[in-house]
Amino acid sequence: MKKVLTLVLALFLSCIMLSSGFAAETIKIGFNIPLTGEIPKVGESSKFAAEMLKADINSQGGLKVGDKQYKLEFVYEDNESKAESAVAVAQKLIDRNKVLAIIGPNSSKQAVPAGEIADLNQVVMVSPWSTNPDTTLDRPYVFRAAFLDPFQGPVAVDFAMEQFKAKKAAVLYALANDYSKGLAEIFKADFEKKNGSGSVVAFESYGDKDQDFSAQLTKIIAAKPDFIFLPNNYNEVALTVKQAHDLGWKGPFMGSDAWGSAELMDLCGDDCIGLYFSTHYAAAGAKGATKEFIDRYNKKYGYIPDDVAALTWDATRLVLQAIQEGGKLSGKLRKDRKALRESMANVKSFAGITGSMKFDEQGDPIKCAVVVRINEKGQFVFTKSVCP
Amino acid sequence: MFDIFFQNLLNALQWGSFYSLIALGYTLVYGVLRLINFAHGDIVMVGAYIAFFISSALLGAFGLPQFLPGWAVLALTIPLTMVLTSLVGVTIERIAYRPLRRKGAHRLYVVITALMTGLILENGNLLLLGASRKKFPEMIDKVIYKVGAVYVTNLKIGVILTSILSFIVLHFIITKTKVGMAMRAISYDKFAIPLMGIPVDTVIVFTFVLGSAMAGLAGILFALSYPILDPYMGMSIGWKAFIAAVVGGIGDIRGAFAGGFILGIIEISVVAVFPSSYRDLIAFSILLLILTIKPTGLFGVPHTTKI
């Protein structure tokens, strides 16, 4: 009995030593993404883009840091598109999986609380898609690859005023979603600044998991706005647009970057044709490295990558570039995490497939936004580019 | 002004119809078994998915040929879905609730089993079909009617009429037929009734057939009106319909029917009058008030036969 026990113990110990010896040769990056829940397509896009990048680098022998080659190991954890799960996932990736850096969460609803965990534990976190300012605000360890809502809001306002000749706007937003609420308020403030107070004639909201928006839409339509602004997730947009048409609305809609999922047109169908939204990149008509990424992704997974896929690609490459620029890894996790934060902060500019970025002192990129139109084939066609 | 009133009235009637249909299922099972079947909202979800697969198959998805026009597909999908959903309901009764009843377990344990069954249905669906949403096919062309400044679709009218019709049918079954009488009898005294030669299990199965068929019907209509399906779609509306059933007086189908419409009307009118962010706060405060004044619900009477 004792012998067996000793044997088991010895095996166990050697396993631990082996795995820690093995870990020195790999770089572990955690992904805190919504594989189930409200927006599973977002998680899928992130995962697919990351898998493609990992295959690229590992097939060339790994990432070269200093004079050593490291294999990449990506850990995908599902945050169920919930704020509390995103926090738990961040903690798990940091403590149990012992990752060097975290990519995600994507939505601000999860990125704002998860960012707190990453920052407290001094682990670099890069959110690909979050646009709410609070995600990175006063958090030295949190970065992002997307532009911010205080920039996106005015882009939507200016575009709508020019394109629809709009003097009056209506907003319908999701109350329990930090992203939607934040952007709706920024939009309202900016629109009223440019068109006088009271020019946002209806400012309505709905709750978590709501499917019926008829009362809010009836109120909005009765207020006779020139267009309706919907800063909401694509699944809710599909329902809202349909119900508005059922209630006799024939005017235009304006959307935000949360519309830009590959699944939007599957769910929304003909109702969404001809609508505009602001986003990070336009897949139709892309050039250079962006086009190469789109073609490869499309070939591998069978659909045009949405902006989340492109931003995840950029965010992950940004982290890898920072690791390389840091020179070498010591193998001591705490030290490496701190060193990575320094080299992330030193990245002056980065040429991503969603445009080139510079970073300000908050860790936010300064980059351009585009407005796309949904054409008759359901493609997102470039209409206008707005740079800060 | 009147336009907005009538428009919102129609909105409220449609939304209340869903609550009513789902609340009817809750109340039927409760009336007979004194069991709050918390899996009911998820049975609605299962119904919607069943309808999705039947209608997609009949419309020529999955590589099958389409040989029926849209209206015929709808006419076939409704009864088929109701039958299949009631099979699901009966199966749940058979494997989850009946063993506990046989062992004489306390009702509390059965309620917890029901909660777990709901979670199993949700997560089973997630595992089986994946997390991505399904788009429910449009079987009939949507027609938008315009009366004055009030807009209404053929679907909206269909939903409201169906819920009223199914209430009338259920009411007839319970008050006028023999099996309805047996259901009321079990609700009255479940120990004496077997001695009278009434097959209790058969009646209970029949109750689940009725309740789940209602859930299936609600699932189709819900999916037609809000054509995006996900595994958690039944949860929130199921909870709210349960509240509607309690407000109406759970166990009484008139109560469930009225309670559903009351909840729908309250929710919509709160949004119409107040800022929409206060909707649930105000709506449920009103319901709480109703229950404080009349704890047994509107139609509920303490200590009498309920169904």
Image (tube, rainbow, N blue to C red):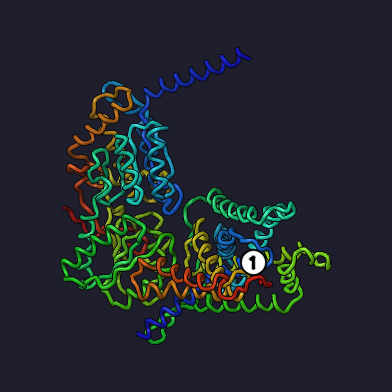
Q: Please provide percent x and percent y for residue A37.
A: 45, 52
Q: Which residue is drawn at 51% across and 70% down?
A: B291
Chain that bears disc 1 = B
The N terminus of chain A appears in which quarter of the rendering?
A: top right
Image quarter of residue A353: top left
Viewer-nearest residue: B78 or A92: A92
Residue A203 visible somewhere in the drawing: yes
Considering the numbered disc 1 on the image, is that residue within a helix, a strand or a loop?
A: helix
Q: Residue at x 68, y 56 (%)?
A: B91
Image quarter of residue A69: top left
Q: Please provide percent x and percent y for residue B109.
A: 64, 52
- Residue furthest to the top: A3
Q: Please provide percent x and percent y for residue A21.
A: 41, 20
Q: Which amino acid does label 1 sit on?
A: Gly
Tell whether B278 sits left or right of A154.
Answer: right
Tell whether B267 sits left or right of B256.
Answer: left
Query: Please, is residue B33 above or below residue B158 in the view?
Result: above
Tell whether A35 sits left or right of B294.
Answer: left
Q: Which residue is drawn at 44% across and 76% down?
A: B11
Q: Residue at x 43, y 40 (%)?
A: A77
Residue at the disc numbered 1: B211
